[in-house]
Image (cartoon, helix red, strand yellow):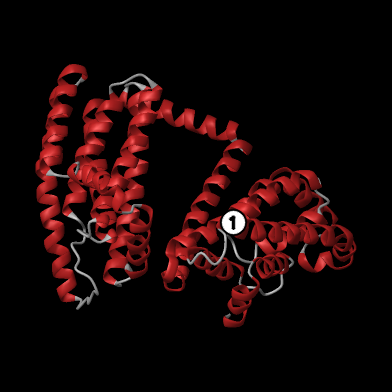
Amino acid sequence: MESITSYVDHYGYIVLFVALLLEMIALPVPGEILMSYTGYLVYQHHLNWFLAIFAAGFGTSMGMTLSYWIGSILGGPFIKKYGSLFHLGPKQMERTSSWFNRYGNKVLIIAYFIPGIRHITGYFSGITRGNFRAYAIYAYAGAFFWTGTFISIGKLLGPKWDQFHNSAIKYMGIGIVIIALGVAAVYVYRKYSLQIKSIAYALVLWVFSIFKTRIRTEFVIAGTAIVTLGFAVLMIKMIQFFVGNEFQDFNGVVNVFVPLMFDRQWSWVMDLFLQLGTQKALMTVIILTIMWILLRGKDKTHEILTLFILTMGGELYEETLRRVFHQVEANHFITLDYVTSFPSDGSIMILIVYGFAVYMLVRHSQRIWIHTLADVLLVVCLLLIGASHVFFGLQQPSDIAAGFTFGGVWLGLNILLLELFRLL
């Protein structure tokens, strides 16, 4: 590794171009580490950011082009002779080629971020004789997106590029897996849309026949149940990470990236979002929520009672959690290298109050654009409130994330109870 970085120090763009070309034809070159180090050189002003991305992206594109034509020329005879050993007979190969020609190019951008997969996509595209023009569009676009991402990460991390490279890669990998699952879900829905719609319609009719209520309420219950279950699963995973003291990498990456994304010129913005999490701001949101319920609510008593239980019970909920986890920390002799407030009590109440306010706004509004805008603003607001606490060094990122997660479970359960009262 040291020899490669020394070559980059001396020859810069040429080494970057050649190394990534060689990696795309499946030679053992540590491309991601090399690009992160290149970003560090950009940080030191030894290399130009734009030219570095161009050299890396161009080298990757040429490597993908070369692997495509190698697969196109040599892959066919190889598969015919040895394909049966890999369960790739003529019929299987025909089905695989049909699928790959239809969907394969679209997953190229994601494939770059998966080691091993990016090294074979070019060859496989050539073997299946896919349309080269369509392949090139996605392959080249993905090449510049991939190289630009890692070089920019190295530039952002600066002197800490080596320390946090592996951690950044790990959490990026998690994000790529989530995206891949989303793509797979879209594919399954498109292929089996008629069956899925018929099953969903049958379920709606079944619920409707039992509760004799509006379909809107049934979908609200189903959606809330799914989201609450997701929060509960994430909560269990976070508890495991806390007990196993496995939040160091996550905290390290976030604590590095937040100051890099928001320098001191953003102080007034961060302070503004910090104020949105204060008790004064939360009380204002609660009052506005009550006014909205009185103005537009159709079940005012239950909705105001739910808000009361959410807030008053939320205070007891967060106090109980804090004591339980302090006891867990003491009993399991968990030694942390940072001061913890797991889960953050402030984050719990922030999500509960803002989440219920947005829920009431969406629940009593018929306009779809309001639903979308309110949901997006809620997510952005929560992220920036959390970032403000990290920016000013008030809490650890893991504590904030846990607070939002635990708060999501409490909020979801109360909304479910409210909707069940509507049905009854």
Nearest the viewer among 408 and 51 is 51
The quadrant holding residue 87 is bottom right
Residue in view at x 19 percent, y 68 percent:
339
On screen, 419 above or below 152?
above
Residue in view at x 23 percent, y 35 percent:
356
Residue 309 in view, yes or no = no
| Residue 344 horizontal/vertical position (percent) | 20, 56
The quadrant holding residue 227 is top left
| Residue 40 horizontal/vertical position (percent) | 50, 67
| Residue 36 horizontal/vertical position (percent) | 53, 66
- The crowding category of the residue bearing disc 1, from other C-alpha atoms within 10 Å (few below 14, some 14 to 19, many at least 20), is many
Looking at the rendered image, the quarter that the C terminus falls into is top left
- As helix, strand or loop, the secondary structure at mark 1 comes to helix
- Is residue 252 shown left or right of residue 48? left
| Residue 7 horizontal/vertical position (percent) | 63, 77
Residue 171 in view, yes or no = yes
Nearest the viewer among 383 and 225 is 383
Looking at the rendered image, the quarter that the N terminus falls into is bottom right
- Is residue 114 shown left or right of residue 171? right
- Is residue 206 shown left or right of residue 242? right
Residue in view at x 42 percent, y 25 percent:
205
Q: How many marks?
A: 1
Identify residue for label 1: 146
Residue in view at x 13 percent, y 69 percent:
327
Outermost residue on the front side: it is 45
Which amino acid type corresponds to the residue marked 1 in the rendered image? Trp
The quadrant holding residue 23 is bottom right
Outermost residue on the bottom side: it is 3
Nearest the viewer among 5 and 393 is 5
On screen, 155 above or below 287?
below
